[in-house]
Image: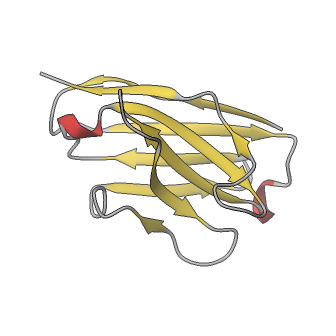
Amino acid sequence: VQLQASGGGLVQPGGSLRLSCAASGITFSINGMAWFRQAPGKQREFVAHSPSGGSANYADSVKGRFTISRDNAKNTLYLQMNNLKREDTAVYYCNVGVSGWPYDHWGQGTQVTVSS
């Protein structure tokens, strides 16, 4: 299984970014997929989850600002992040699998920095 995350960068507060996670080596459509993040000096935390069937769910801190989506034809997971805040600064990781929580497979992470 390979997960390649991209789309991170430097953005001003209030700005937007879209993260992508391209997957290979899995049957994408039957996998649950999620985003986690880890800020400096903090533990990795849950951000958003797209189960293989059912509705997405979000951490309270990003609800209404972030949207998780998936394109099964492209084997790609997305995280649209709007109205970014300084506290969203972190390394973002995609997480994929069919069981357990967190799932078994992790991407390499992409840095998001929100700063003026």
Residue 73 drawn above or below residue 93: below
Residue at position x 41%, y 64% in the image: 58
Q: Is residue 13 left or right of residue 2?
A: left
Residue 74 drawn above or below residue 53: above
Residue at position x 23%, y 41% in the image: 84
The colour scheme of the drawn protein is secondary structure
Percent x, y for residue 56? 50, 69
Residue at position x 54%, y 61% in the image: 49
* Quadrant of the frame with the N terminus: top right
Percent x, y for residue 32? 69, 61
Residue at position x 48%, y 37% in the image: 19
Percent x, y for residue 72? 72, 56
Q: Is residue 50 left or right of residue 3?
A: left
* Label tally: 0
Percent x, y for residue 92? 47, 36
Which residue is at the front of the view, 64 or 73?
64
Q: Quadrant of residue 24?
A: top right
Residue 83 drawn above or below residue 102: above
